[in-house]
Image (spheres, rainbow, N blue to C red):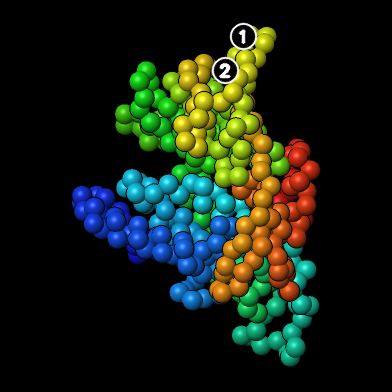
Amino acid sequence: MDMTAGIAEFGRLTNRPELVAWAKRVYDWIGRTHTTRYGWVADVSGGRICESCAIASRIRLGLALYRAGAADPFGEIDRHIRNQLLESQFMNLDFLSPLAPQRPRTDKTAFAGIDCMIRGTFQCWGTANDLIGNDDIEGCGSGGGVQGLALAWNAQSEWRDVPGGKELRVHLLFNRTVRGPAEAQITSGTPIAAQIWSWLPYEGHVAVVAQQPLARLALRLPDGADPNTTRVRRLVSSETHAHESAAVLDGKYAIIPDVRIGERTDVTFQLKEYETVETAAGVRYLVHWRGSSVLALEPRGTRAPLYVDRAALKKGRAPLGQPRYP
């Protein structure tokens, strides 16, 4: 997929649409045959292992096709980031056997500090339902997992020209301070344009506080959101009453025009609960969803099963703060 992403970029930059079309066929085939909706991506054709690197590679290819106008990958990126990639991060290390040598220590064998080394990194030997697919740890997952997060972070939003000014289009609803569009001779360090606050995955709620006037704000609803329940509440700092209405939708995006400086916009929506059947490495899995987040997966893994700590997502209230590491 990394190779294919390069071909898609080359096709876009050299006006070779046949190369972009070929890359899209590769992307679609891998999606149909070696990818689940929650983010398991086989490391090789016919493989049972999901490397964090493979998730990053799929995100990279999807974004290359998006830039070429050939794909809309953001629903998938959101699902993959929130599920398999986060579940592939080493947090609870209770699965580790005692870190003591079985024979006298030599120059080539070290055990001390392994738990500290891997905490916070990403697995490279996960399966569709288990953090532990093989008994060893491969280092490339650390970089691959971080790349996946960075690719999604960098593609979270973009600026578009619209009549009357600029549109801030937010593809992924993560907490973020967004800077204004790049100005002449400046590519970074521009003034803050907006702050994004997200209650996902606990609640279908996102708020945007504008630090600059926006000709238009567009927020992409996550997969699993009920568009018919989407409401927009707007409050300008100089006013005492908020204005609430049904959202105007353009496809997956809630459109809010003429956002004033200091205005707070709250978009709320219900998150559907549903089930899908996914096939990974020839095994069928029943996946329980709430919005774009997995609540549970069956059959469970046997060594370090995934999604076992997600019951709190059904409480419907985002915690004020939750440490990532114990």
Q: Nearer the viewer, residue 311 or 210?
A: 311
Going by the numbered disc 2, the residue's amino acid type is Gly
Label 2: which residue? 262
Q: Position of residue 192 (x, y in %)?
A: 50, 27
* Residue furthest top as drawn: 239
Instruction: Name which residue lies at 54% across and 23% down.
Output: 210
Instruction: Name which residue lies at 68% across and 9% down.
Output: 240
Q: Position of residue 114 (x, y in %)?
A: 68, 71
- Element assignment for label 2: loop
Label 1: which residue? 238
Instruction: Name which residue lies at 29% across and 60% down.
Output: 22
* Residue furthest bottom as drawn: 103
Of the 4 image quadrants, the one containing the C terminus is bottom right
Q: Can I make out residue 266 in this image?
A: yes
Q: Earlier in the sequence, mark 1 or mark 2?
A: 1
Q: Position of residue 99 (x, y in %)?
A: 75, 77
Q: Can I make out residue 193 in this image?
A: no
Q: Position of residue 132 (x, y in %)?
A: 66, 73
124 displayed left or right of 307: left
- Element assignment for label 1: loop
